[in-house]
Image (cartoon, rainbow, N blue to C red):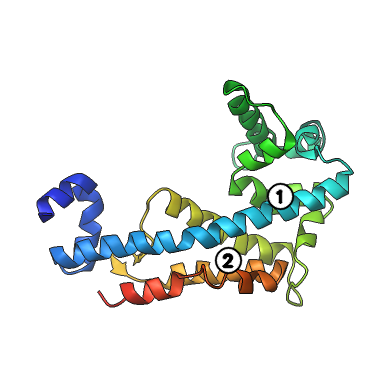
Amino acid sequence: MKFSDFEQYFSAARVNRYLLATANSTSKAVKLYKANLKISQAFHPILGVFEVILRNRLNDILTSHFTDPDWIINQKAGFMSDPSLTFTYKRTGKQKTNDFLRREINKAEKRLQKTRTPVTSGKIIAEQTLGFWTDLFEVHNYRLLRGKPIQIFHSLPAGYGRKEVNEELDKVRRFRNRVYHNEPVCFNGNNVDFTETLEVHKSITNLLTWIDPEIIKLISDLDKVKETIDKAKQI
């Protein structure tokens, strides 16, 4: 394919960053663009495993905490509507309600109803984004849940708690969104740099290890991130 066609299909604005990073070499720019896609592709299996395990373990813990397999629906009127979630925003003086969790469940219910799919807890759980689950580790919800979410991590390092876990989760969540929205993961400014990408890979590994070290062994044959990055570095 001619570079002019490549640029037209993927947009000059998007491609220009790859040109800048490769000293205006059109051939290297195309290779780097494809390498970026391959790195994102390599993350899909481990991100998928991470999301499923995080979701399922949190559901197990909260099902036990509330003694209710339908907690995700019933708690819309429970901790997700707690008065403490309404507060005055200091910068503007306006009142604000943190109803993110409740709104996400309402949206999931509407999507299911629109397709005439029975609204069940299992369906609602499957509909939730990674952001829903990581939000359970934010201070407001974590306190209302009496710190139960941290119990999914059986192998936390000494001195680690909600804050450290939440920082790792946030790093993975933001990166995951970039991957799923086709944003580049190979840059630091206009320079090719995989430092942040490797840090996110480490965060995923850390979180899964803290849940159960055996998980890393289970998915070792699926994890091709580092070798894919090594190939990209050769461009």
Tell me the residue that label 1 is attached to: 136
Residue 189 visible to the viewer = no
Q: Residue at x 67, y 36 (%)?
A: 123
Q: Nearer the viewer, residue 114 or 79?
A: 114
* Location of residue 217 (image quadrant): bottom right
Mark pair 2, 1: CA separation: 18 Å
The residue to which callout 2 is attached is: 204
Query: Residue at horizontal 62%, vertical 62%?
Result: 167
Residue 117 lies left or right of residue 148; in this view the side is: left
Instruction: Give the residue displayed 57% in from the left and 24% down from the top.
Output: 115
Query: Quick one: label 2 or label 1, which is nearer the N terminus?
Result: 1
Q: Residue at x 20, y 56 (%)?
A: 16
Relative side of 223 to 36, left or right:
right
Q: Secondary structure at mark 2?
A: helix
* Residue 153 appears in view: yes
**Left/right of residue 9 with respect to residue 163 in the rendered view:** left
Q: Amino acid at mark 1?
A: Leu
